[in-house]
Amino acid sequence: MKSSYELAMERLNKSAPAVKVTAAQKKELAELDSLYTAKIAERELFLKGEAEKAAEKGDFETLAQIQKQMVSERKTLGADLEEKKEKVRSKK
């Protein structure tokens, strides 16, 4: 007798089968992860430096803008990463 989990997984695989990823695709996905992790870290370091300068000057408006920019750039880079990963996954 199958558990409800197993039955649910069977139904899920029928409606949206799992995509198989080759070793080359896995390598390419790992490289993308590494590249975008570095890009995000680089932008955060730069913006944190700018935020510290603004905080030292007491310019809290600029500090708030920098923090918003940091969040925005993280989202943008994350979306770009996911788009590129999806392209790699869809290659055959």
Image (tube, rainbow, N blue to C red):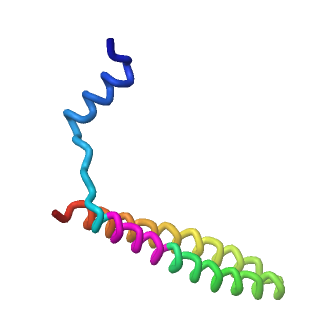
Q: Residue furthest top?
A: 1
Quarter in which the C terminus is drawn? bottom left
In this rendered view, identify the residue nearer to me: 33 or 59.
33
Question: 89 or 53: nearer the eye?
Answer: 89
Displayed quadrant of residue 25: bottom left
Dominant SS in magenta: helix
Residue 78: % across, % down? 45, 67
**Which residue appears at 38% of the width and 71% of the height?**
80
Identify whether 56 is placed above or below 87: below
- Please report the residue visible at 69 percent of the width from the left and 86 percent of the height from the top: 50
Pinpoint residue 45: horizontal percent, then vertical percent: 65, 82
Q: Position of residue 54 (x, y in %)?
A: 75, 85
Image location (x, y in percent) of residue 59: 77, 83
Describe residue 35's horizontal placement relative to residue 66 as left or right: left
Please state if 55 lies on the left or on the right of 4 as rendered.
Answer: right
Q: Quadrant of residue 27?
A: bottom left
Where 39 falls versus 8 (above or below)?
A: below
Q: Above or below — where is 69 with respect to 4?
A: below
Front-most of residues 47 and 9: 9
Task: Tell how many labels.
Answer: 0
Residue lying furthest front: 23
Q: In the picture provided, is 2 more to the left or to the right than 70?
A: left
Q: Residue at x 82, y 88 (%)?
A: 57
In the image, what residue occupies the spot 44% across and 69% down?
33
Q: Quadrant of the N terminus?
A: top left
Q: Is residue 75 left or right of residue 22?
A: right
Give the extent of the magenta segment: 26-36
Q: Is residue 65 magenta?
A: no
Tell whether position 31 is magenta: yes
